[in-house]
Image: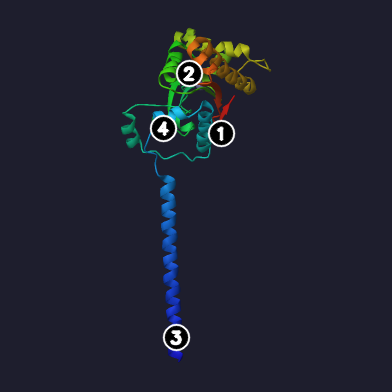
Amino acid sequence: MKNLIKYFGILIVSLSVISCITDKKSESAKSTVTETVKQAPVKSILTAEEQENMTPDEIIGKLKKGNENFVSNNLTQRDHSSQRREAMIGQYPKAIVLSCVDSRVPVEDVFDLGIGDIFVARVAGNIENADIVGSMEFATAVAGSKVVIVMGHTACGAVKHAVDNTNAASMEMNSLQNLLDEIKPSVKATPKSGEISSKNTEFLTNVIHKNAKITVEDIRKRSPKMASLEDDGKIKIVAAVYNMATGKVEFI
Ligand SMILES: [Zn+2]
């Protein structure tokens, strides 16, 4: 009898161990499946149909969500080889972003985007000129993008030099001087609060905001086509500022 009890005892313990191992295995299989689903890289790129079906407001919403992913360090995995191959057929980007050249502003990453998602135009101080607006006319009126974002950024060096009235021409940099002169109307248009100097952080930040807004107005003035697309609700032209400390994009 004692032997029988001992036998059943061993059997029950063995079954418990086996069941425990099986449970652990299935849990680990489950978590592997979950991880695989979570990390499955995006292989496709935007299609003409997807671009066609999005409104400007929906696109801005998606860009804001993408920026949340960037801020929380949760960027989407992408299969660039596969996306590159798909992109050979054509491109249907949803927006064009005009950014400063600053190396600390990685535009696609900032919105959690990749190949085929957006056009990016860059020039120090994110000002507009004929070539930039020409690129935007192509992006919107020809290639179907529905949102134009002029994105300044905090602590912008180009805006700092415009505020401080740096004389680049005296250092044989006439082209840089021309660029700084393009930013100066934004310095003049910003309400004065304290010292006119890039050391005045509040004033500098206000100029950076004003500069993005003035660029938006200048784009509308320079391009009747884009202004009329916007009047018809087909595109939106908006200003934004990227905060380098937090990674957050503020639409203004
Ligand atoms: Zn800058």
Spatial separation of the CA atoms under disc 1 and disc 2: 21 Å
**Mark drawn on residue 181:** none
- Please name which of the two marks, 1 or 4, marks the residue nearer to the observer: 4
Spatial separation of the CA atoms under disc 1 and disc 4: 21 Å
Which residue is denoted by mark 1 in the rendering? Answer: 246
- Please name which of the two marks, 2 or 3, marks the residue nearer to the observer: 3
**Taking the image as drawn, is residue 55 in sight?**
yes
Spatial separation of the CA atoms under disc 2 and disc 3: 82 Å
Which residue is denoted by mark 2 in the rendering? Answer: 124
Upstream in sequence: badge 1 or badge 2 = 2
| Badge 4 residue CB within 8 Å of ligand 1 | no
Label 1 crowd bin: few (<14), some (14–19), many (20+), radius 10 Å: few
Question: Looking at the image, is 16 positioned above or below residue 84?
Answer: below
**Mark drawn on residue 6:** 3
Spatial separation of the CA atoms under disc 1 and disc 3: 65 Å
Q: What residue is drawn where x is 64% and y is 23%?
A: 202
Q: Secondary structure at mark 2?
A: helix
Upstream in sequence: badge 1 or badge 4 = 4
- Please name which of the two marks, 1 or 3, marks the residue nearer to the observer: 3
Counting from the top left corner in percent of width and height, residue 18 is at 41, 71
Amino acid type indicated by mark 2: Ala
Q: Quadrant of the N terminus?
A: bottom left
